[in-house]
Structures are given as C-alpha cells and as structure tokens.
Amino acid sequence: MTNVAPLFTRTRIGALDLPNRIAMAPMTRVRADVEGRVSALTAEYYAQRASGGLLITEATQVMLNGKGGTGTPGIHSEDQVTAWREVTDRVHGAGGRIFLQLWHTGRAAHPSFLPEGEEVVSASAIPIDGMVFTPAGRVPYATPRALSIDEIPAYVEAHVTGARNAMAAGFDGVEIHGANGYLIDQFLRDGSNSRTDAYGGSIENRARFLLEITQAIADAIGADRVAVRLSPTNPFQSMTDSDPAALFSYVAAQLAPMGLAYLHVMEPVAEAAMPDENGMLRTAPLLRAVFPGPLVLNGGYDAASAAAAISEGRADLIAFGVKYLANPDLPERMRTGAPLNAPDVATFYTGGESGYADYPTLDALESAA
C-alpha cells in the first residue's frame, strides 16, 4: 500500500491549523438560484466534505457583470451573504475550515448572463476564441469592452467588498481567483492584455491589478485570511503568455512579503506534465523558490503523487477537484486505500442533488451492503 502518511500530518496556513494536507479545490457547480444565492443543498454538499484540511468554494462573483453563467453564486448582496452563512455554519459544525473563492469572469462572461445594462469587460478588447454555452445554445464569445484606467479602482474595491462580505458570512478566509482565464488572469497574461497604460505592457504593469487587489483585501481582513490562485501555463479560454516563467515568478515574489495564507498553483502533476514549446516543464518550482509561505498544488494528483509532493517539500497542501466532488469522504478513502466513487460527469452542471450531494461515503456503502 502507498505510504500516504505525509498527507495526514498537521500544518498551519495563515490563521488556521489544519488536521491534514488535503484541500478541496474550487469547482463550479451551478446550483445557485437566479439571484446568486446558494441553498441548503449547497450547505449539505460542503458539510459532507468537511474532513479535508481546507475546503475552497466554487468561484463566487463580486459584481453583477462578473457573473459566470446561470447558477453561479455571488457575494455582493445581503441575501447572498445570509445564504452563505448557512454553508459556513454547517461546515464549521462538522469540524471543517472553508475559504470563499472571489471571482470576476471578465471576458468569459456573456451578455445573456448579465442583467440589462451590464457589459462584458476585460483588460483589453480581445475576445476568447471559441464558443460559449448560453440559454440560447452555443454562440461566439462577445468582444469585451476594455476597462478604462479610471474604472479599475472600483473593480479593486468590489473584490474588497466581496472579501468583507465573505468574512461576514463566516468564512475562514478568501482565495482570490487569478487563474484560468478570468478577469485578473486577463490582466496578467499578455495574450489577453494589450494595454499601453499603467496596467499593461511590462510584467510589473500587468501584475498591478492582482497586487492592488491582494494588498487591499489583506489590509481589509488580514493577510493571514487571504490567498491567491494562479494557473501560469493553463491555455483554457485561449489564454497565452510570452514568458510565463518570468511573469509568475515576479508575481509570486511580490506576493511573498504580504504574509498570505497560501499561494495556490494549478498545474499538471509533475509525473504527467510535458514540456511546452519552450521546453519548460513546470513553473511551480520557480514559484516555490520565491514564495516562502504555504504552497497549494492542484492538477491531477492521486494519493501517491500527492504524498510524494508533500514529503519532498514541493507543496504544503494538495488540492483535489473531481476526486473530492465524487468522494465526500476522500481523506478517509486515501488514508485506508479504499476505492473511489466514479464521478458522474453528466451531472456536473445540471443542478439539483443528483451528482452533487448524493455520492455515497464508505459508511453508507457498508450500511447498504
């Protein structure tokens, strides 16, 4: 049996002591109502998974024009805060710890997702290459309007308000979504940022938006309650950068002195990674070298590769996505080597309990046998 003991050592991130090194990655599940409010079913879903060291929620929009699609939750209204409070109460009652991921989709939104009068915005007027699913079917992504430099402070402040609202809802902290081709990532990478002002051009300028948001949130709620997620080489949503090693090493080095709870890097597990066209295998070791705080890795790990990453000092936590979605008791299954439930891909985004809060635990399977 694989030695998974490193996954079950205690550690500390920011203000939290964790009982193990297993995190639940943020995963969009589109179970919120039309007003962006989560439900008792969402509370059940997260509470079922509370045995992990840390739960990170699905991406949650901080503004109306940041909505990612039908069924995505928000954290910009009083009703949304109240709804999320039921989730945090249930998770804490089950002994867990939970961060809210703050999100603005930028050009990944579509006018059909947004209230009348709201616009799709981005760093630059460069659309995603491809099609988006809308209530009317698959249509091309809209060309976004580039944010003016005078508008940017309001977007920084919206993230701060979202973080304050998350704390009011009882979360243990927030994770800033700077990955996967959404608004902050659109500022970071030069394939989506052609600006010529203080937020474009050089690496320092393109990183400015993320760094301003992070520092402002840290000032508002305490740096030890704040984390950042990055995906340096993820091409999702037609994202590219001419020098991801330099860009994200700079970003990590600038985040380092802030005293954040952790840095979360999404990148394929080392054993499965292939060099890109520049021959660069991984950026995570570069970020690890300049960011001395806790590092969370995410990208197709299993129990064996996760334990190896922890024991070799490559990471402090490993975040699991689909495996955790399908296995609410994932830590126990990894600890004992028990088989995993297979995920039902057809129900990932369909709404309702099926494929959400109905995956069986080991105890439930034994009781039914």
Image (cartoon, rainbow, N blue to C red):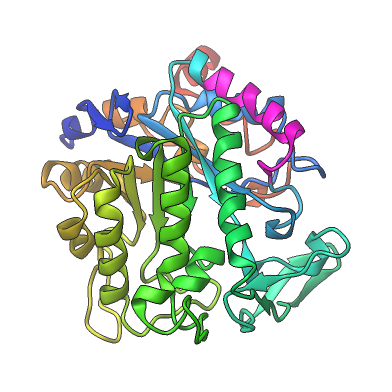
Question: Does the segment drawn in magenta span residue 89?
Answer: yes
Above or below 24: residue 151: below
Q: Residue furthest left?
A: 312
Is residue 282 found left or right of 58 in the rendered image? left
- Residue 21: say if magenta: no
The majority secondary structure of the magenta stretch comes to helix
**Residue at the image position 28 percent from the left and 58 percent from the top:** 269
Q: Is residue 62 above or below residue 352?
A: below
Q: Nearer the viewer, residue 69 or 348?
A: 69
- In-image side of 91 versus 289 (left or right): right
Give the x, y percent position of residue 10. 22, 25
Can see residue 33? yes
Where residue 325 sits in the image (x, y, percent)? 51, 40
> Which portion, as a residue range, is magenta?
73-91
Q: Quadrant of residue 201?
A: bottom left
Identity of the residue drawn at 64% across and 30% down: 84
Q: Is residue 29 left or right of residue 198?
A: right
Question: Is residue 360 in view?
Answer: no
Task: Classify 134 as above or below 198.
Answer: above
Across and down, in percent, residue 58 comes to: 56, 44
**Towards the viewer: 344 or 57:** 57
Q: What residue sits 25% from the left and 53% below the top? A: 256
User: What residue occupies the far front of the structure in this picture?
Assistant: 150
